[in-house]
Image: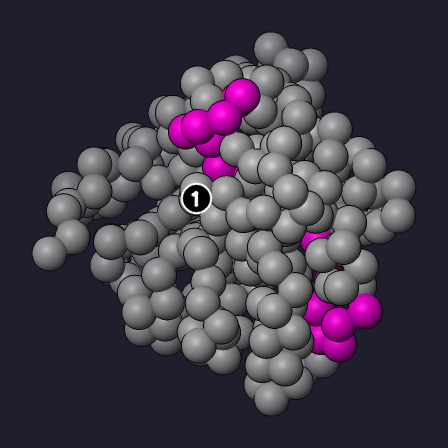
């Protein structure tokens, strides 16, 4: 086993232990929570090692990094998540490799994604879309976007309806990033509890939109306790990220 593989295996084991412990504390089954490893700034070779170690869900937040990495790993059975703020001029590229886009936050993006899926040969596959909820826009005007992207909670249903009616797309659930400002700053558990309330309301009209992506390396326990179905972990698995030049 190479040094890097041994390092990643040890890190994965620690993260697995954290998720399992959080599930036990919350009275949840371990299989209720899916680990997504965020591989941004790390090379395709790490993705291959992670696959060897059993990881099947990976995420990227920049298309310029994700596209070549996905191509280099096209022979692997992986589910690719796009989790970064997405500009419409990158949509066609992202659709070519992503299975799920977790950062849908405006109707213009819904329209662009649907058009791109229509042009892309996806063998009839639908693109799963999560609505990114900006909890720092909690009391903002309808449609306001948060500091880290996302739509205010009262804009969620409009986006879900747009996704439901958009060819090639399906509303799969919600995503959030613990906010740095607003009423939930520094209150990750309260933020994730609020996301679960919004998710419950969303499922009333869109029962299949049951995915809740919340929690990262520093706060995955809070997300699991609140009821998240997916956690996005990067640093705790891959190490502290090298600086971007």
Residue 38 located left or right of residue 227: left
**Residue 210, x across and y down, in percent:** 75, 43
Q: How is the image coloured?
A: one colour
The furthest residue to the left: 245
Q: Is residue 168 magenta?
A: yes
What residue sits right under mark 1 in the picture? Answer: 148
Q: Along the line of sight, which residue is nearer the eye, 72 or 40?
A: 40
Residue range (magenta): 165-184
**Residue 4, x across and y down, in percent:** 19, 44
Q: Along the line of sight, which residue is nearer the eye, 130 or 159?
A: 159
Q: Can you tell which quarter of the image residue 158 is in?
A: bottom right
**Residue 133, x across and y down, in percent:** 60, 42
Residue 220 located left or right of residue 139: left
Query: Considering only vertical position in the picture, is 75 above or below 224?
Result: below
**Residue 141, x across and y down, in percent:** 64, 42
Crowd rating for badge 1 (residues with CA inside 10 Å; few <14, some 14–19, many 20+)? some
Q: Residue at x 70, y 69 (%)?
A: 169
Q: Is residue 107 magenta?
A: no
């Amino acid at each position: 086993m190479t040094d890097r593989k041994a390092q990643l295996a040890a890190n994965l084991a620690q993260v697995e232990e954290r998720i399992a412990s959080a599930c036990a504390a919350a009275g949840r089954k371990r299989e209720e929570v899916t680990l997504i490893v965020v591989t941004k700034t790390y090379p395709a070779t790490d993705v291959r090692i992670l696959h060897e170690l059993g990881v099947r869900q990976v995420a990227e937040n920049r298309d310029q990094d994700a596209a070549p990495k996905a191509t280099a790993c096209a022979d692997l059975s992986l589910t690719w998540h796009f989790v970064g703020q997405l500009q419409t001029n990158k949509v066609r590229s992202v659709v070519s490799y992503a299975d799920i886009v977790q950062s849908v936050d405006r109707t213009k993006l819904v329209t662009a994604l649907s058009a791109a899926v229509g042009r892309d040969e996806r063998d009839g596959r639908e693109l799963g879309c999560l609505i990114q909820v900006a909890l720092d826009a909690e009391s903002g005007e309808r449609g306001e976007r948060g500091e880290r992207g996302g739509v205010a909670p009262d804009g969620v249903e409009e986006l879900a309806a747009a996704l439901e009616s958009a060819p090639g797309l399906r509303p799969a659930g919600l995503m959030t990033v613990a906010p740095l400002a607003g009423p939930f700053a520094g209150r990750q558990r309260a933020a994730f509890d609020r996301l679960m309330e919004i998710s419950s309301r969303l499922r009333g009209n869109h029962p299949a939109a049951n995915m809740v992506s919340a929690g990262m390396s520093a706060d995955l326990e809070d997300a699991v306790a609140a009821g998240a179905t997916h956690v996005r972990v990067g640093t705790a698995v891959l190490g502290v990220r090298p600086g971007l030049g």
